[in-house]
Amino acid sequence: MDIDKEYIHYQESITSLNRAWRTACELESTPPGSAIWSAAYRMVLIEYCKPFKNSFDEARKRYALSVPHFDAEKRYCIRK
């Protein structure tokens, strides 16, 4: 039964990450500044973070994706 729950969590994680990616791609072609753009940007952040937050089942077993690790070069590029 645990493998079923892990699979469901994995599916939901993929759905959240795909939703975040699609919305972020749409935002690239939209001029920033409007209230709708800001709300969509916040939704992207929330959807992206969901899979990495601990999710508990009724037996208090945790499910979460591991947090991605960036090498030093990529971290430097992100901070620019």
Image (tube, grey):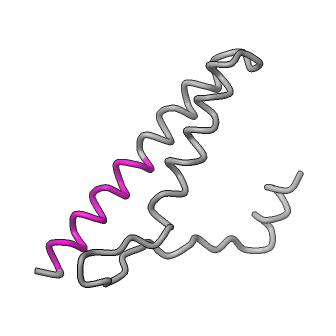
**Residue lying farthest to the front in this orientation:** 58
Q: Residue at x 37, y 81 (%)?
A: 62
Q: Residue at x 57, y 34 (%)?
A: 24
Asked if 76 appears above or below 24 in the picture, the reply is: below
Q: Is residue 69 magenta?
A: no
On the image, which quarter does residue 2 sit in?
bottom left
44 or 30: nearer the viewer: 44
Highlighted magenta segment, given as a residue range = 3-17
User: Residue 55 in the image: x percent, y percent?
Assistant: 39, 70
* Quarter location, residue 77: bottom right
Count of labels in the image: 0
Residue 41 lies left or right of residue 22; in this view the side is right
Residue 7 lies in the magenta-colored region: yes
Where residue 16 appears, as percent x and y from the top left, is: 41, 49
**Residue 7, image x, y percentages:** 21, 68
Q: Based on the displayed image, in which of its 4 quarters is residue 41 positioned?
A: top right
